[in-house]
Amino acid sequence: MISATAVGNIQHFRKVQPSAAALVEGILAGNITALSRAITLVESTNGSHLAKATEVINACLPHASQSVRIGITGVPGVGKSTFIEAFGKFLTGLGKKVAVLAVDPSSTISHGSILGDKTRMEELVKDKNAYIRPSASGDTLGGVARKTRESITLCEACGFDTIIIETVGVGQSETAVHSMVDFFLLLKISGAGDELQGIKRGIMEMADAIVINKADGDNIKKAQFAKMEFNRALHLFPAKKSGWTPTTSTCSSVTHEGIPVVWETIEKFLELTKGNNYFFEKRKEQNQYWMLETINEQLKTNFYSNPEIQKSLDSTKKAVQNDEISPFAAASLLLKTYFKKD
């Protein structure tokens, strides 16, 4: 049986959209509902939501930047979600407030996403000092959602002092997440073939620490061997600008063995980089990077929403498919149409 009154109340509640000021007030008060609604607003592709989202972000900005941002990546199946739950529970046990921004891959066919991270982190999701927000990667590269950077700002303003970004785990395309975090953690597993063969130079150079996960049971010796192999490989890379030497360690998300060591490593990294001012300089560079990325994104959005482009895009696509015009000439033609002067 369905109560018509209850349905009416739910529909009425959904229609009531809080103002930007109300969302900001709720976020600064630590209201999770306000935070979730604000992130939904920020992630929206509806053009009418852009101004409101910008107003919320600008109001929250002075209250942000007081957290440590940790990026966690690794190939699918390495146990990222299980590790994050164990790590998150350890941090909340220390009195930290942890926000997890988990990104799930979107289907290239249906464009849908499972968003199952809350199901995987069933213990952490019930922790009052933790917040888990799954988002779809959409068509963006780098293993993060298009608006993850803004979501970090909102979570920080809501009082979360530790932000964890879990990437899709796409291999080498991790530049985006590296450009929005302070510490970049690469999860690996042993027994998945030759460890050195599995090393990808780009992602290894970005990693501040490598953790061999699933080091439990019969896998402990293999994990220790993998640790030695990766430790040797790290010496092949040039020194980091931060002055930090990447570390390797093993852990088990099931037994929680090695989890405290990961946090100790992050604390040592923060002490070093804040001491030599690299931490703050890197954040300034990241702000500049995301300004330029936002310009690129806005230009792309404006281009495809331009009436003249929409009018001629389909016919130009067909001409390219039929080899009537080269892709480069077609692109040049469309750009000239977009930038033409009245």
Image (cartoon, grey):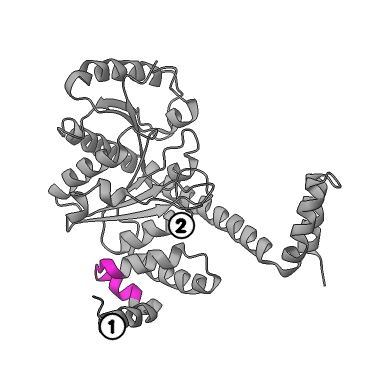
**In the image, is residue 98 above or below residue 244?**
below
Q: In this orientation, which residue lies closer to the viewer: 247 or 91?
A: 91
Check disc 2: other Cα within 10 Å, few if <14, some if 14-19, many if 20+. some
The disc labelled 1 sits on which kind of residue? Ala
Dot 2 or dot 1, earlier in sequence: 1
**In the image, is residue 127 above or below residue 182?**
below
On screen, residue 315 versus residue 213, left or right, reads: right
Point out the stretch of residues depicted in magenta: 23-33
Check disc 1: other Cα within 10 Å, few if <14, some if 14-19, many if 20+. few
In the rendered structure, find residue 4 and report the number of the disc placed on it. Answer: 1
Residue depicted at x 83% and y 48%: 329
Q: Which residue is mark 2?
A: 147
Residue depicted at x 18% and y 30%: 258
Q: Quadrant of the N terminus?
A: bottom left
In the rendered structure, find residue 17 and report the number of the disc placed on it. Answer: none
Residue depicted at x 78% and y 52%: 318
On screen, residue 136 versus residue 82, left or right, reads: right
Can residue 29 be found in the magenta stretch? yes
Can residue 313 be found in the magenta stretch? no
Q: Secondary structure at mark 2?
A: loop
